[in-house]
Image (tube, rainbow, N blue to C red):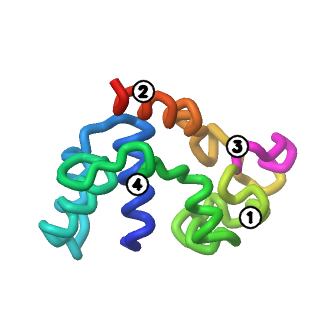
Amino acid sequence: MHDRGRLIVASFLTKDLLIDYREGERHFMWHLTDGDLANNNGGWQWTASVGTDRQPIFRIFDPTLQAARFDPKGAFVRRWLPEMADVPDESIHEPWRMTLETQQRVGCVIGRDYPAPIVDHAEARARALDAFRG
């Protein structure tokens, strides 16, 4: 799994969903064939902003912005999510913003062919900041 993907997943789980980093760390270590104990554990701690290098305010990564920056045309997304193959480039990272007509035309109806967002990142970010400040 690409390091950027690991970072985005770790940030989403620990910051957007406020899941204990050890859950993700354990899952990755169990399932990834390239799991390295120090790198995996350290990476999850770094992203979760725990341990010796706490930076809770600076390490809340927006998954949509990360995807747009590092996969602007959606090649990675289309490779691993075939249901997104025909989604227009401008909608590849936020397919839920397509009109229903466009969703039907490209065969990617949100809630049927692809899940709707489970959390609003802006709200989740604010909740995470409150948790770290409190």
Which comes before the other along the chain, label 1 or label 3? Answer: 1
Q: Amino acid at mark 4?
A: Val
Q: Which residue, given by chain and number where applicable, does mark 1 sit on?
A: 86
Q: Is residue 38 above or below residue 94?
A: below
Looking at the rendered structure, the number of numbered marks drawn on it comes to 4
Which comes before the other along the chain, label 1 or label 4? Answer: 4
Which of the numbered marks, if any, corresponds to residue 44? none
SS under mark 3: helix
**Quadrant in which residue 56 is drawn:** top left
Which of the numbered marks, if any, corresponds to residue 96? 3
Question: What's the magenta region?
Answer: 95-104
Q: Which residue, given by chain and number where applicable, does mark 2 sit on?
A: 130
Q: Nearer the viewer, mark 3 or mark 4?
A: 4
Measured as percent of width and height from the top left, residue 81 is found at: 56, 62
Which comes before the other along the chain, label 3 or label 4? Answer: 4
Q: Residue at x 40, y 73 (%)?
A: 2
Q: Which residue, given by chain and number where applicable, does mark 4 sit on?
A: 9
- Tell me the distance, in whole angstroms, between the alpha carbons under discs 1 and 4: 24 Å
Q: Residue at x 82, y 40 (%)?
A: 100
SS under mark 1: loop
Residue 106 placement, left or right of 79: right
Q: Is residue 15 above or below residue 95?
A: above
For mark 4, does the 10 Å Cα neighbourhood hold few (<14), some (14 to 19), or many (20 or more) residues? some
Measured as percent of width and height from the top left, residue 9 is found at: 40, 54
Q: Nearer the viewer, mark 1 or mark 3?
A: 3
In this rendered view, identify the residue nearer to me: 42 or 31: 42
- Tell me the distance, in whole angstroms, between the alpha carbons under discs 2 and 4: 21 Å
